[in-house]
Image (cartoon, rainbow, N blue to C red):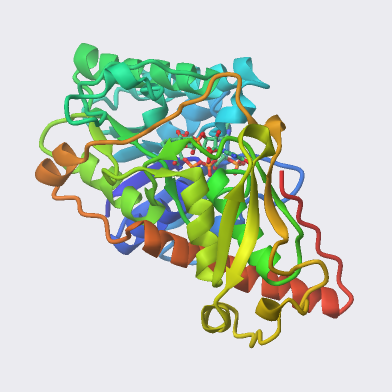
Amino acid sequence: MKTALITGITGQDGSYLAELLLEKGYHVHGIKRRASSFNTQRIDHLYQDQHQSNVNFTLHYGDLTDSTNIIRIIQEVQPDEIYNLGAMSHVKVSFDSPEYVANVDGIGTLRVLEAVRILGLEKKTRIYQASTSELYGGMPENKNAAGFYDESSPFYPRSPYGAAKIYGFWITKNYREAYGMFACNGILFNHESPRRGETFVTRKITMAAAAIALGKQDCLYLGNLDALRDWGHAKDYVKAMWLILQQDKPEDFIIATGKTTKVRDFVQMAFAHVGFTLRWEGTGVDEVGILAGVDEQKYFEATGVALSTLATGVDKFEGLSIGTILVKIDPAYFRPTEVDLLLGDPTKSKTQLSWEPEYDLAGLIDDMMGSDIKLMQKDMHLMQGGHEVHRHSE
Ligand code: NDP
Ligand code: GDR
């Protein structure tokens, strides 16, 4: 049985990767942070009582800012593979706590690599480092002739997060070259899922579209609608992480779909899932998305609710009718420096890893919307039963 250690196991990717490795027969160890309330919702279904026999899922308390704890856990676990996914991963928030992000996302990577070296595990333990398309910074002049970022495109990070992750990238490459370690960077472009954190733009949109369609929220406030992202599904991307560590020699790989979409169009597609068409009016901070039409059949298929009155202007839900403003701009979501466009070239991963994603953008949005409609309906049942449910759209 192979043994893997995942930092960031409580996050979106950590949870899918843990499922994948368990399916493959690994003993999966994960590092979780101590928090004042539970932060293990994404992996609670994997929990195992450690007193049982045949345990193959084990959690350890720890933090990437604490070398002593990283060394101790790696010594105890003696992992064949380490997936370093732990990070403060929100680009906008990294402008608020840049030093912390440098410590966790940058130096945290060094702590993992150095622990493996200190423990003499350089030849045993393979290391995957969660690198990111944010390294490219969306600089147009750095795209290749075909208009993509590829493994040889220059980096130009545009946030404290990107700057911290570039250190993680280079120190991983350096430990590979200096000490012959099997340490690889996966340069992953944006990937999303029903488990995506609620403050990333895709999840914020799908939760809001579901809540608005069910009459539970009035309006969705967003920042830059013109940003372009290469969005894939996290379930597909964790398969690539595993493949990267199964190769004969350590290398860095881009994982991307090779297609890019504007935030505005993602909004349109999410609302289309519930049969809503949006019309955009105004420019800049005054741009708004207005409800222009409703396909009742699609609404019924998505929500199970027959909506015979909304399209004729008789409000099914208070305040929601054709012409209602559903999307507004809040400049608070603008970033001091923005990454305008990301588009990755997955040729190397497709040819060398034989990696093929199962989801396209439409499939990803269906998955997220289906899940968020169920979530909102569950909230509404609880509220009808007299329970308090609080969700805030940050
Ligand atoms: P999430 O934000 O969902 O998860 C981050 C994980 O890191 C959580 O488990 C979090 O713990 C943990 N973590 C945060 N701070 C620390 C710390 N100080 N010590 C130990 N663990 C910590 O991110 P994703 O799952 O989306 O991403 C996984 C990795 O991939 C991250 O490194 C991210 O930067 C990178 N990445 C993500 C992409 C994406 O599109 N999703 C694209 C490219 C790279 P807790 O649950 O307690 O907060
Ligand atoms: P990103 O993801 O910064 O690409 O980083 P995010 O979903 O936060 O933003 C994508 C784009 O949408 C624009 N945007 C908004 N973003 C948020 N969060 N909230 C809003 O209201 C909003 N309105 C518009 C942003 O300006 C941006 O252009 C993600 C993270 O997972 C990183 O950890 C990872 O490394 C990169 O993807 C690849």
Residue 93 figure quarter: top right
Please indicate whether residue 252 sits to the left or right of residue 35 in the image.
left
Q: Position of residue 253 (x, y in %)?
A: 23, 34
Q: Position of residue 141 (x, y in %)?
A: 29, 17
Relative to 324, say whether 321 is above or below.
Answer: below
Please indicate whether residue 356 sits to the left or right of residue 287 in the image.
left
Residue 231 in view, yes or no? yes
Rendered residue at 30%/45% (across/down): 259
Relative to 386, say whether 259 is above or below.
Answer: above
Relative to 337, say whether 275 is above or below.
Answer: below
Rendered residue at 37%/20% (across/down): 139
Q: Position of residue 156 (x, y in %)?
A: 38, 15
- Nearer to us in this view, 183 or 274: 274
- Nearer to us in this view, 122 or 87: 87
Please indicate whether residue 315 sits to the left or right of residue 7 in the image.
right
Judged from this view, the residue extending furthest toward the top is: 178
Rendered residue at 62%/36% (across/down): 223
